[in-house]
Amino acid sequence: MLFNDYPFLLVFLPAALLIYRLADPYPQLRIGVQVALSLAFYAWGSPSFILLLIGSIAINWLASVAYQRVKWPAVLTLVMLPRRSSPSSRITGIPTGPLTLLAAE
């Protein structure tokens, strides 16, 4: 689903705005409603990637909790940096992240 599709403009957007407006008086529900609406949007467009999205959210959340507890910048660095190279980067020649750029120099 694209942002300029009729199903988005006429169904999803009005429903999402209404649901969020109903949750607005309850601050403890706002983030949960936004996450649920985001997952619903991505599930509508590409349901096969929902587990990947949920896994990515969980890893990022766990990294932020770990960083908040220990305050080590290395915790964030370990989570943010990708592997040195992947099969797709070898095929396309496109670097996958900072480590690849440092290794190439």
Image (spheres, rainbow, N blue to C red):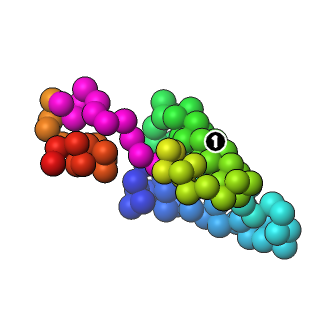
Q: Position of residue 37 (x, y in %)?
A: 63, 53
Residue found at the very far bottom of the displayed protein: 25
Q: Position of residue 59 (x, y in %)?
A: 60, 41
Q: Which residues are magenta?
A: 80-90
Does 28 sit left or right of 88 as displayed?
Answer: right
- The stretch drawn in magenta includes residue 89: yes
Query: Nearest the camera: 45 or 30?
Result: 30
- Badge 1 is on which residue? 58
The image quadrant that residue 72 belongs to is: bottom right
Q: Position of residue 94 (x, y in %)?
A: 18, 42
Tally of numbered tags: 1
Does 76 sit left or right of 103 as displayed?
Answer: right
Where 75 falls versus 53 (above or below)? below
Q: What's the residue at 78%, 71% (across, down)?
A: 24
Q: What's the residue at 75%, 64% (across, down)?
A: 30
Observer able to see residue 35: no
- The stretch drawn in magenta includes residue 75: no
Q: Position of residue 93 (x, y in %)?
A: 14, 38
